[in-house]
Amino acid sequence: MTPFDLKNKTILVTGASSGIGRQVAISANKMGANIIATGRDEERLKETIDLLTGEDSQYIVADLLEQNDINQLVEKIPSLDGVVHCAGIVRPYPVKFISTDVLHQIFDINYEAQVLLMSQITRKKKLNKKASIVFSSSIAADHPYKGGALYAGSKAALEAFSKVIALEFSHMEIRSNCIASAMVKTPMFETAETQGTKERMDEHIKKYPLGVGYPEDVANTAIYLLSNASKWMTGQTITLDGGFLLGDF
Amino acid sequence: MEDISEFIKKIEFEIDEIESETINPETKFRELEEWSSMMGLIFIALIDTEYDVTVNGDDLINCVTVQDLYNVVKSKIQ
Ligand SMILES: NC(=O)c1ccc[n+]([C@@H]2O[C@H](COP(=O)([O-])OP(=O)(O)OC[C@H]3O[C@@H](n4cnc5c(N)ncnc54)[C@H](OP(=O)(O)O)[C@@H]3O)[C@@H](O)[C@H]2O)c1
């Protein structure tokens, strides 16, 4: 037994149909957790579940932009020992063209959905004592880039929200932390590549002393945050950037 | 879609770094001195906002002249 053990813990993972969320489900399950995987794409959720061992993991399809889906999801889930929020989108947009539509497109899923999900989960008393909440932030929250007004803003908002969760539920020893990653190889990475250009992304990744990140790197940090090994850590953000922000460009 | 002169007017008006009446259909926009990745984002957002059409970074890279870009936007509208 290691301090990173997740045996008998039930963990809800959003965005579990792809990328980081899928890997968090797999890695946490390997450490003994039962997973509730959620996302919109049923086929890809099934693929995630097929990669898990044990009988107690399941998937629940939910579009987190629909309050009804959130309510039903929370209705169906058992009490949780952890939540890892991995749903999110990226879309660069220069300030001068931001409209209500674009603003909502990004903030609704990157911020609002996670706030409403946490509000339902806590209201319905679905968090066990000592539960651990993990949010997917980005280094952009503190180190933004041109075109990143909405993405960086949504992640900064999420980091603030995480701290409030840490405060409001500390009496139950519930903890809340963020993982702020630089670029990680997932389908989102490919989207970001086509939104800019491959050339530009290659240039960017060259500035990472340890190279690009992989979903396992984030998932292993999530394991730490979910496990009792991090029982004194709350309201914090762990940066994972392969050394990028050391700034030796 | 409106004709290319309107398209050019919009680019010249919306993109601060490009003065009016400095580009034409043959202009190789990525070779402009002012070209930057930010300007690429502005082109993409301008086209999204004005024509409700999504072009991506690779579409931009595949275009040499303003005419090429106009043609891409036009083909995506249809
Ligand atoms: N990859 C990176 O470089 C990177 C860096 C820093 C932070 N992050 C953050 O890490 C998180 C995961 O990123 P990723 O790279 O794993 O992205 P990804 O592969 O694109 O996965 C995104 C996930 O979000 C889910 N999702 C999107 N809209 C949803 C909605 N309306 N309702 C429910 N689920 C929805 C998707 O589910 P469906 O496909 O089933 O719809 C998918 O599972 C995101 O918050 C991202 O901002 C990523």
Image (cartoon, rainbow, N blue to C red):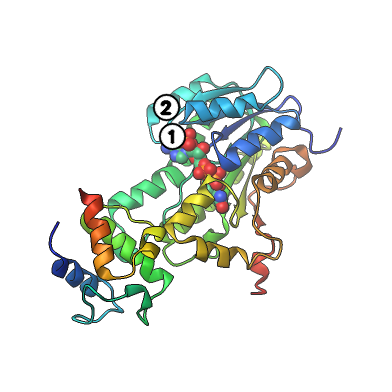
- Label 1 beta carbon less than 8 Å to ligand 1: yes
Q: Secondary structure at mark 2?
A: helix
The structure residue drawn at horizontal position 34% and vertical position 52%, both measured from the top left corner, is A103
Relative to A145, say whether A160 is above or below: above
Instruction: Report which quarter residue A244 is drawn in.
Output: bottom right
* Amino acid type shown at disc 2: Asp
Q: Earlier in the sequence, mark 2 or mark 1?
A: 1
Report the disc number at residue A82: none
* Amino acid type shown at disc 1: Leu
Relative to A97, say whether A33 is above or below: above
The structure residue drawn at horizontal position 34% and vertical position 65%, both measured from the top left corner, is B63
Residue that lies at the very extreme toward the top in this rendered image: A55
The structure residue drawn at horizontal position 64% and vertical position 57%, both measured from the top left corner, is A212
Relative to A76, say whether A218 is above or below: below
Q: Nearer the viewer, residue B72 or A88?
A: B72
Q: Is residue B4 visible?
A: yes
Q: CA distance from mark 2 to mark 1?
A: 6 Å
- Label 2 beta carbon less than 8 Å to ligand 1: yes
Which residue is identified by label 1? A64
Residue A183, percent from left and from top: 58, 56
Q: Do the residues bearing badges 2 and 1 touch, measured as CB atoms within 8 Å?
A: yes
Q: Nearer the viewer, residue A27 or A78?
A: A27
Residue A206, percent from left and from top: 63, 66
Which residue is identified by label 2? A69
- Relative side of A180 to A30, left or right: left
Residue A209, percent from left and from top: 70, 66
